[in-house]
Amino acid sequence: MNKVIIFSAPSGSGKTTLVKHSLEVFNELKFSISCTTRQPRGSEVHAVDYHFLSPDEFRQKISEDAFVEFEEVYTDKYYGTLKSEVEKIWNQGKVVIFDVDVKGGISLKKYFGEQALSIFIKPPSIEELERRLISRNTDDAETIKTRVAKAEEEMSYAKEFDKIVINNDLNIAKEEIESLIKNFIERN
């Protein structure tokens, strides 16, 4: 059976760190590169971190029914998962791993059903989340304020995921993730 693992979390929860760790530990996983219309941050590279598209290019793909799921997170700020990306990974005999926002994670779980393990990464608190976003130094104060407000709402969706991992201690969170993934991959 083709499988997918979905990681979702409020921004700043440590989701990307845990996804990268999972990819290092499990050779059978392959990262699904999402599409976005936002600008690259820091050292992000097109077709490595994201497929960076213009809003018009993204809307064209929507009209072609090219996405498994997509979301307009803010006006003209789209994120989505291409069907072709998932098929390419499955054709390599790998398990797809997603790093997506909370609504995207819920949509992917609905789409893939039993083929999916959905994991919600929860920060220890909203205050800690805000501290992490500030220390990342990638967003201005207004953006951080918006992300924190959005995170409070996103936390209410945690129960819609198969598993919740609280990222208070990174090493403990890594161990939890490894155990969840190992059990899921080995399950028939």
Image (cartoon, rainbow, N blue to C red):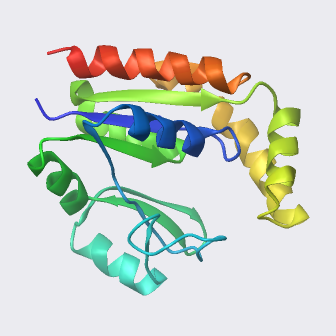
Is 18 or 11 nearer to us in this picture?
Answer: 18
Q: Examine the image and state in which quarter residue 112 appears.
A: top left
On the rendered image, what quadrant is the N terminus found in?
Answer: top left
Answer with left or right where residue 47 lies relative to residue 68. Answer: right
Is 172 or 120 nearer to us in this picture?
Answer: 172
Asked if residue 107 is positioned above or below residue 125 in the image, the reply reads: below
Residue that appears at 37% across and 23% down: 181
Residue that appears at 47% across and 37% down: 7
Residue 47: image location, x then y, percent = 38, 71
Residue 92: image location, x then y, percent = 12, 49
Answer with left or right where residue 141 lies relative to residue 44. Answer: right
Q: Examine the image and state in which quarter residue 23 appears.
A: top left
Residue 106: image location, x then y, percent = 43, 37
Q: Examine the image and state in which quarter residue 130 appears.
A: top right
Residue that appears at 86% across and 53% down: 134
Asked if residue 5 is positioned above or below residue 172 in the image, the reply reads: below
Q: Is residue 162 visible?
A: no
Residue that appears at 22% across and 52% down: 86
On the rendered image, what quadrant is the C terminus found in?
Answer: top left
Asked if residue 81 is positioned above or below residue 187 in the image, the reply reads: below
Answer with left or right where residue 102 lies relative to residue 81. Answer: right
Asked if residue 142 is positioned above or below residue 184 in the image, the reply reads: below
Is 169 or 60 nearer to us in this picture?
Answer: 169
Q: Is residue 1 visible?
A: yes
